[in-house]
Amino acid sequence: GANGTYIFDGSGTCGNDTAIQCTASRGGSFNEGTSSTWSLDSNQTNAVSAGELFPWSDTGGIFGADTFQLNTNTSVKDYPLGIIRASVFGINGLGLGRNSTLINALSSANLITSRVWSLFYGLTGADTSSQMDGNLVFGGYDAAKTSGANYTTQFTDNSNCDSSMIVTVTAITMNLANGSNPDILGTNYGSALQMCIDASYPIISIPNDTWANFALFAGGNYIGRSDGINIWGLTYPVDNVYTGGLTFTFSGGFNITVPNSQLVIPNLSINSQGIIVINDTTRELLINPLEPPNNNDFPLLGLTFLTSAYLMADFDQGQFTLWKAAANETQDIRAVAPSSTCIIANSPQQSATGIQASPGPTFANQSAQPGSSTGISTGGIAGAAVGGVAFVILFALAWRYIRRAKQRRKYHDVPESSAESKTRLSQLIDSQKLMRTHELQELPSEVAQELGPDRPHEMGQGLPHEVATGGHTIPYELDSGLPSPKPLPSVPRSRW
């Protein structure tokens, strides 16, 4: 399920990994025996309210509740938790789906003004110039991490996309060193492809034929799949790997570019002592070609995409918003008003404040209630204090990753670029000539009247050959004519 909070305790194994290696790869472990506020809930009373039952009861898992200490000033009492005791690969999951237990709990306790969360994953490149902590905001967003116009559209129910954040991608272009920008999507999908934004997925997955087009231009000497932290990515020698970026263009012309510094990074793994290690001789291309038997999987835009895109999910409005991410160390936390698209600027009159602690996430809330607990925050989680944002990022990854890792499936070797057909290449190049420019258009007057003056404004559409969107609404831009908020003080955070 994508809504519940499911975490590991010290039981269970991860294949042949050592115990400390297994614990580290899971993002830490919870010891319910050391918590004086833990209570067992065998009937999963609170789980039903989240719209899903704990899926690991048949493998020895238990369900209960504890005080969830989010930071020094904010806690939630009797918070429902599922404890996984199975021998599986995975990571602690803080479900942030549309019926999120955590978001609903924070809203019910009046700790946030609206059922909204926002994420900047941070930068994960090879050197310090391309590394930066990210942040997770509840009840609002960090305006300092956004840049330019935005792309807003509604959630779409789809059993293959747990987040319900489905976007229509009209082009995937490579940014080559020679200045050319071939579109590897071509006409394979009628010049449009639906993809799922999934903050629980570590990299980016694309259809196998799209990957074959990528390989024609990318070069590099492919070694094999990674089984490290960014599992299923593609490894190459450090001096013989793709050197460009990748741009995703969405319906309406909005686009996000993932630069090479975030697309190709060191191959990371966790050793037997539970320490993250780097293989200096290789680089990992953070793309997962969906080969058989996974060729029918929904393509995913995971955390690699979210190094370059800022994401806000608004459950009250039933919509989500993307911006180009602005990577910086400043903060400008703004609360989002409930049941509207109004942004509340931080000011003494509005009492929307930002809270930050280390370890712990960033909040936009109305009236943070100081709380103390001898529960999870006082030693129940082992290994959580990896860094100011490491806890947030690791713990915020949702359940889908655990489920996928549980059902690990064997992949065949990916195709290499050196022996591809010239005919295929010429067909791909010809298809680029047929691609039409996506011109922005004004929102039709009848739609504008229906939305009303208080609704967000459209960015434009004009999508040629658009696939059926199954209930998608037209993407539009949120109103940016807002008062400037009082900036919050930045809190230094250690890097993991």
Image (tube, rainbow, N blue to C red):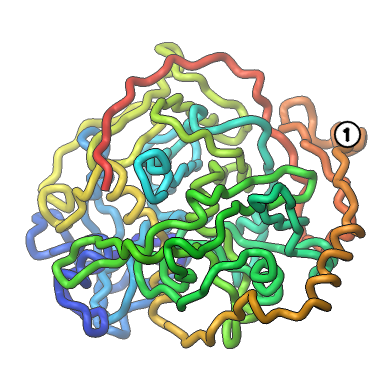
Residue that appears at 72% across and 27% down: 454
Q: Secondary structure at mark 1?
A: loop
Q: Check the image and report above or below for 205 versus 146.
A: below
Which residue is more in the foreground, 227 or 73? 227
Q: Check the image and report above or below for 102 versus 450.
A: below
Q: Check the image and report above or below for 363 versus 473.
A: above
Residue 444 x, y percent position in the rendering: 91, 37
Q: Is residue 46 visible?
A: no
Residue that appears at 35% across and 41% down: 128
Residue that appears at 24% across and 82% down: 60
Which residue lies most toward the top here? Answer: 349
Q: Say which quarter of the image contains residue 34.
A: bottom left
Left or right of residue 245, residue 194 in this image? right
Q: Say which quarter of the image contains residue 342.
A: top right
Q: Is residue 236 visible?
A: yes
Which residue is more in the foreground, 368 or 87? 87
Left or right of residue 285, residue 323 in this image? right
Residue 399 x, y percent position in the rendering: 41, 66
Q: How many marks?
A: 1
Amino acid type assigned to the residue bearing label 1 in the image: Glu
Residue 242 x, y percent position in the rendering: 56, 60
Left or right of residue 90, residue 473 in this image? right
Residue that appears at 62% across and 64% down: 218
